[in-house]
Amino acid sequence: MTDLLRRAGALTFSHMGMFVCEPERMAGFYKEVLAFTETDRGLLGTAKLVFLSRDPSEHHQLVLVSGRPSDLAFNLINQISLRVQDLQTLREVRRRVVAHPDASDLACVTHGNAMSIYFRDPEGNRLEVFMDTPWYCEQPLREPVDLDLPDEVLMAQAEALARSRPRFQDRSQWMADMARRMGQS
């Protein structure tokens, strides 16, 4: 059997999150200096999130998250995210995470617009491996899922969650709008 993760394009870098002290100031910097477009913002619990992208096919390439203590040095990176193309590959990554003694804190979730696993590496850095769904929905959104369910059931759950959001649309429609907003259409 071919190793799924060794296929070209099986695992690609997508986006990152960063803890910041002043989300508005940081978002302004990235938008003004580097021409990022704000794609979403909101609260996840008490954390304020601002999603930024320069690519209309990416909901966000950078997410700024409030909560960095101004008087405490710690890792500024919230997560490192990698994209896979299908649920089979996502399950293979999960299998490897479960089998590795130094990985921890595995969580399987859907964001409506993606199916994800989160886990920590040996030094506690958070990683996300995810698969896009065909839908856009407002973020932040995170609900647990059981990756052992059949593909059709998982995708139906993700679609129902995405459709429950006020700005639901097909990913292709959202991407075309982002291209227009970013001046790329």
Image (tube, rainbow, N blue to C red):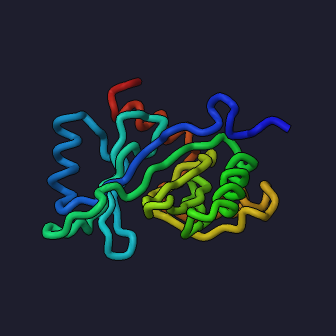
The quadrant in which the C terminus is found is: top left
Residue shown at 58% from the left, 50% from the top: 130
- Residue 17 locus on image (x, y percent): 37, 53
Residue 103 image position (x, y, % from top left): 57, 63
- Report the number of discs: 0
Q: Give percent across and percent down for residue 57.
A: 48, 36
Q: Which of the pair 169/69 is nearer the observer?
A: 69
Residue at 49% x, 64% y is: 141
Farthest residue, direction bottom: 45
| Left or right relative to 32: residue 90 | right
Position above or below: 7 against 147: above
Residue found farthest to the right: 1
Instruction: Give the vertical position of 45 relative to 153 (above or below).
Output: below
Q: Quadrant of residue 150?
A: bottom right
Percent across and percent down for residue 151 are 78, 55
Left or right, 24 with respect to 13, comes to left
Name the quadrant containing residue 134.
Answer: top right
Taking 125 as reference, is 16 above or below it?
above
Residue 162 appears in the rendering: no
The quarter of the picture where the N terminus appears is top right
Which sits in the foreground, 129 or 162?
A: 129
Q: Residue at x 13, y 69 (%)?
A: 71
Q: Residue furthest top?
A: 185
Q: Is residue 100 visible?
A: yes
Identify which residue is drawn at 33% across, 27% down.
183
Q: Is residue 101 left or right of residue 156?
A: left
